[in-house]
Amino acid sequence: MKEVVVLSGKGGTGKTSIVGSFAAIAKNKVMADCDVDAADLHLLLSPSIKETNEFRSGQVAVIDNDKCIECGLCQELCRFNAIKDYKVEPVSCEGCGFCSHICPVDAINMKECKAGDWFISDTKHGLLVHARLGIAQENSGKLVALVRQKAKELAEKNGLDYIISDGPPGIGCPVISSLSGTSLALIVTEPTLSGIHDMERVLAVCKHFGVPAMVCINKYDLNDKNTIAIHDYCRENGIDVAAMIPFDNAVTEAMVKGVSVVEHSDGRVAREIKSLWQHIDRKLQG
Amino acid sequence: MIISIASGKGGTGKTLVATSLALSLKDRCKVQLLDCDVEEPNDHILMKPDITRNEAVSIPVPKVDEGKCTHCGKCAEVCAYHAIAVLGEYVLTFPELCHGCGACSYLCPEKAISETPHEIGVIETGNAGGIAFGHGKLSIGQPMAPPVIRKVKSLIDKDSVVVIDTSPGTSCPVVEAVKDSDFCLLVTEPTPFGLNDLMLAVETVRQLGMPYGIVLNRVGVGDGKTEEYCRKENIPILLTIPLDTNIASLYSRGVPLVEGMPDYKEDFIGLYEKIEEVVSERSSRPQR
């Protein structure tokens, strides 16, 4: 079984539109939405949820004010400034539990949090594992790991060849969790200076974790000079530029209709994404 | 006055708004621009600051003195992150899992644990044409952005108008960057993805209990559902920016909008004045 994850560094370069199209093109796969704090893939796949599960993770300190003698030790020792006036600010609490261990009168308890939900859905293009991290919750990396694990179990159970993951932007915890141990990372970039800067950082993360990467330039016709710069960078670093997708309003039109762009039109964007998937397919089999 | 710029969905124009807002205000007042998207900071590409100082960001991780350690296991028991483990006669530490809370070193009965800095990123400060500039960069392969964000925010100069740029999403890095702001600007685009993620971002700022408003970017693309949502939820749209290939082209070359198209400066000053009005109206209200 092979797992491909789509990342970008910079947000808004087109990851989800491309993954939504892969869902329509690829056979024998499970889809996984690893962007758990701003998931959008479901908007293209019209899922019907078969299974909803709570994601419980992390803890938050709670002070029993009847027991508290206001000695202030917890406030003094908390490195996250999460305790003020003998009250815990849940948003700042990192759940380390230090305060609960040192409270001289045992007035602090750690309470487990519901940190989100995860789902298994049926879609017109097969199974989808997705999730919703609770508002302002931590542990997105753990939820991503859970989504990937469930996708893997489903793929094994159903004898499917591929897991295709829509990844989060950035390079931090949820990205590392989406990337580590995958077969291939597709980096979707755009020809802006920000897009190039962020692509270089996420490619460095792929290299750090030993995952082979290829690049797709989305809206390549926005700035020719930058598109050439991306090609030069990739050539110098031995990275395959697997596709160049032009800017086309069809992408947003498809999104408004709630379908992937390859289902909406047969224009240049759709053709390029189809050939991109064939390229990835060959690479994964080869 | 601290104004944070967030979005939910990535690529909606946070960096464009943060840099143009800072540049539009610099002739009126002291301005500080802090880029708290430490995973993928981009403001420096547009602002081209002279960086005059950089400082490593570290978190304190445990270092065990094997001579004093009795392998009692207390440290592993109290660590909520499984960043320290005791296996027979060995103590293993995992710095990349450690949050630097200090529980293990404080609670070790033998005082065998000291703390040593583990570098996870860097902050850089300087000046960009009269604007005090600061940003953070998370090191490649490091998962934890919040400590770097906290360090960038330690630069806040309360006598300035402080503009804070943040990462996309709604989880801990965004909350860390946005909290303690006087106002949060949510930048979105009128597409289904933009709206879905805006609704998540709105829930986040509501939970943080601060006033907020919308900048609607690329108006002309997508559909009218975002405006409908804002109307229904009574969320003010403070500025609209049209879909315009000239704007996209300026951004692609790293030129701030108000430098390439100076007419927009008035719009950003107007945006600031609306924010000022909301914030001062709110602070004059009696506090409960």
Image (cartoon, rainbow, N blue to C red):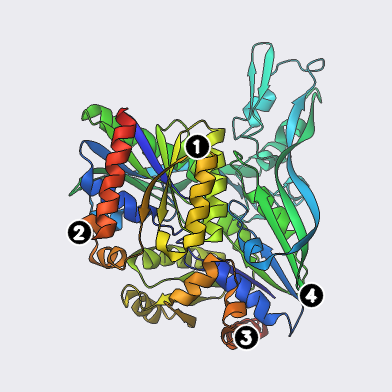
Numbered badge on residue B269: 3
Three-letter code, disc 4: Asp
Check disc 1 and give the amino acid type: Gly
Q: Position of residue A88 (x, y in %)?
A: 64, 54
Q: Mark 1 points at which residue?
A: A238
Q: Mark 4 points at which residue?
A: B159
Residue B126 appears in which quarter of the rendering? bottom right
| Foreground disc of the pair 1, 3 | 1
* Number of residues whose C-alpha sits closer than 10 Å to that of mark 2, classed few (under 14), some (14–19) or many (20 or more): few
Q: Do labels 1 and 3 share a chain?
A: no
Looking at the picture, do discs 3 and 2 lie on one chain? no
**Percent x, y for residue A214?**
43, 41
Above or below, A246 against B279 in this view is above
Q: In this view, does A160 lie above or below A19?
A: above
Of A187 and B273, nearer the camera is A187
Q: Name the residue under label 2.
A: A266
In space, the residues marked 2 and 1 are separated at their CA atoms by 32 Å
**In the visual, does A22 lie left or right of B114?**
left
Examine the rendered structure and indicate whether residue B45 appears above or below residue B162: above
